[in-house]
């Protein structure tokens, strides 16, 4: 079945470091891919999305490219800030009911 | 302001009691979803609804029930049959369930503790 695998956390970085969070997926057809962010005690917010192969989603300095050949959607940011500390979820959206299939989440902690 | 509201933010219940979590949206979205989140895990789908008066089971529907009598409301009842109900519950909505490009919008969540 459809699934999403993310790199395990927690990830701890110093401020201004480069961030990569790996995400790979298994899906039939051509899903849309999403990154969501969750701050402590809150719901999820959409960070970025890509709806077809080779699309690049970007927002707030974060980027991810939909790579069909490697079935990946890695999240990157060139220079992280303390305020980026959160849990990041990779997800794909499937045809059946428009459901989202989530990875297990990666906790990011950025130290000053 | 358009959005999704969930109430209450924190909920405490005794084991054996049913409890209903509220979810309301004013985004005019057709589809609504309930997810459960446990520490260190991703979100798992409980139930979803694509249209009023219709809903489908997700991956972990046992011990839960829902209704969709109005487009804007999708309450979730956690019954006493749910073996491990303590969790963070998130409600989401989306313009169309069939449009893969549409994202889901999430509410702030309800943290349920059952003792």
Image (spheres, coloured by chain):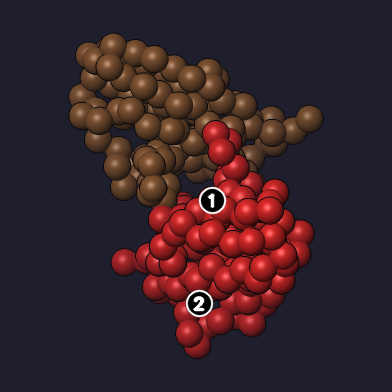
Q: Residue at x 45, y 26 (%)?
A: B111
Residue B83 seen in this snapshot: yes
* Chain B rendering hue: brown
Residue underneath mark 1 = A87
Earlier-in-chain disc, 2 versus 1: 2
Q: Residue at x 27, y 17 (%)?
A: B115
- Residue B43 marker: none
Q: Residue at x 36, y 22 (%)?
A: B113
- Chain that bears disc 2: A
Q: Looking at this rendering, what residue extends furthest in the bottom direction?
A: A69
Q: Looking at this rendering, what residue extends furthest in the front direction?
A: A112
Viewer-side label of 2, 1: 1
**Looking at the image, residue A3 lies above or below residue B50:** below
**Looking at the image, residue B59 lies above or below residue A32:** above
Is B17 left, or right, of A38 in this rendering? left
**Looking at the image, residue A85 lies above or below residue A30:** above
* Chain A rendering hue: red
């Amino acid at each position: 079945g459809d699934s999403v695998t993310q790199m395990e956390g927690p990830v701890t970085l110093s401020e201004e470091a480069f961030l990569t969070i790996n995400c790979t997926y298994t899906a039939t057809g051509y899903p849309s891919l999403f990154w969501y962010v969750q701050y402590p005690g809150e719901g999820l917010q959409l960070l970025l999305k890509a709806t077809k192969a080779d699309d690049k989603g970007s927002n707030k300095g974060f980027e991810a490219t939909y790579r069909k050949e490697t079935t990946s959607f890695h999240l990157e940011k060139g220079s992280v800030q303390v305020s980026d500390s959160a849990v990041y979820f990779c997800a794909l959206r499937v045809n059946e009911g428009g459901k989202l299939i989530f990875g297990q989440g990666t906790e990011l902690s950025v130290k000053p | 302001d358009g959005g999704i509201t969930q109430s209450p933010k924190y909920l405490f219940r005794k084991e054996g009691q049913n409890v209903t979590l509220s979810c309301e949206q004013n985004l005019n979205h057709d589809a609504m979803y309930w997810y459960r989140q446990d520490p260190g895990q991703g979100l798992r789908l409980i139930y979803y609804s694509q249209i009023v008066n219709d809903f489908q089971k997700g991956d972990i529907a046992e011990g839960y029930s829902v209704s969709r009598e109005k487009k804007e409301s999708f309450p979730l009842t956690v019954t006493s049959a749910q073996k491990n109900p303590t969790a963070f519950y998130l409600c989401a909505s989306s313009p169309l369930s069939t449009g893969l490009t549409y994202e889901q919008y999430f509410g702030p969540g309800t943290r349920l503790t059952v003792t």
